[in-house]
Amino acid sequence: MIKPFRIDIPQADLDDLTDRLSRTRWPNEITGAGWDYGFPLARLKELAEHWRTGYDWRAHETRLNELAHFTTEIDGQNIHFVHVRSPRPDALALVLTHGWPGSFLEFLDVIEPLSRDFHLVIPSIPGFGFSGPTHERGWDIVRVARAWAELMRRLGYERYGAHGGDFGSGISLALGAVAPAQVAGVHVNYLPTRPDPDAGLELSQTDEARLEKVRRLMANRPPYQALQATTPQTLGYALTDSPVGQLAWIAERFAQWTDPRSQIDDERMLTDISLYWLTATAASSARLAREAPRRVEPCPVPVGVAVFAHDITQSVRPLAERLYDIRHWSEFERGGHFAAMEVPELLAGDVRDFFLPHIEQEGPTSRVRRHTP
């Protein structure tokens, strides 16, 4: 059963947030430390004060409620999603999946351009926001993909595409694997490619530089990733009890993963962080990193890739082609990990270029594009 949903955070929860922010215990900081030891104190105090005194959740809540929100129970879990129908009668449906530390909010700026040509289904991953928390083991990306397949079936979509970034990329590819007869293609803006010494490939200098970046990341696993993949419950105690802790944990990712030329404004970032805080989903969202399988089934459907220059890593096409049926590959000089929020016009255009051929004929055409500012 699919039910309409309206965002309506209790005022007591907003008052509690304001009170907790006013009573923050701040650590000291080494003079001139900058980013050497983590998120700078002065910048975090600035964000926390704006969250406490200048940020208006109700205003953002009102705007979000202009969208059509729904919930349904799948596999024992409440699933929240936004559903936007296109005026185009032959529109292909697309399911858009966010990652961490994002949310369905990532796609707000691509709804208008994409809905001209596509029906849009934008779910919240189980354990995130209004789809959280989860209450049992096993919600990995394959199980989420199966839930998406059931959601699209309930909505009456027999054929659809999938797009995602971060965890949304893995979920979208897994959706192509679990429902290949329904998924027309998968478009991603994040596709990690690991070094493979047995591949026997001759790579360009650019690709070798990209792999060296991956090697450095593999040798020095980011602390946030290690904690969420090993002890998400322990981490959850701190982030669920301290709004400034939750603020620093997510704001650091936004600061480090975005293109400096396309900074996400504080209001949008605080809305995303507020969603995690107000739904108390710090621990359950982190569990996805613990549950993520080390191997997923191959994705047999056509794949499109958008590579953004300031993402955590950049994909290497010859390695990607060993795993996926790559039909479309674009390189952008602007944009980072949160492409839908940073450069929505570029991402929406690339998604359209990959999927629109499905309206005229089955199967995206093969193409490669490089973009400069």
Image: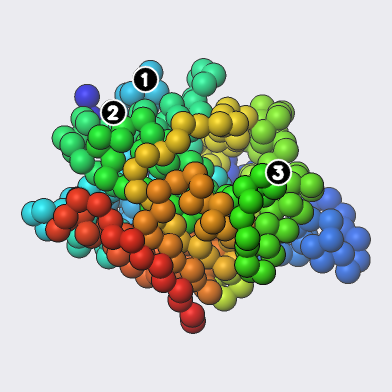
Task: State if disc 1 and disc 3 touch (CB < 8 Å).
Answer: no
SS at mark 3 in the image: helix
SS at mark 2 in the image: helix
Give the labeled residue for mark 3.
Answer: 224
Q: Position of residue 372 (x, y in %)?
A: 49, 80
Q: Is residue 76 above or below residue 215?
A: above
Q: Amino acid at mark 3?
A: Tyr
Disc with the residue nearer the chain's start (3 vs 1): 1
Residue at horizontal 33%, vertical 23%? 74
How many neighbours does mark 1 have within 10 angstroms: few (below 14), some (14-19), or many (20 or more)? few
Give the labeled residue for mark 1.
Answer: 75
In this picture, residue 186 sits left or right of residue 253:
left
CA–CA distance between discs 2 and 1? Answer: 9 Å
CA–CA distance between discs 3 and 1? Answer: 29 Å
Disc with the residue nearer the chain's start (2 vs 1): 1
Task: State if disc 1 and disc 2 touch (CB < 8 Å).
Answer: yes
Q: Nearer the viewer, residue 25 or 362?
A: 362
How many neighbours does mark 3 have within 10 angstroms: few (below 14), some (14-19), or many (20 or more)? some
CA–CA distance between discs 3 and 2? Answer: 32 Å
Task: State if disc 2 and disc 3 touch (CB < 8 Å).
Answer: no
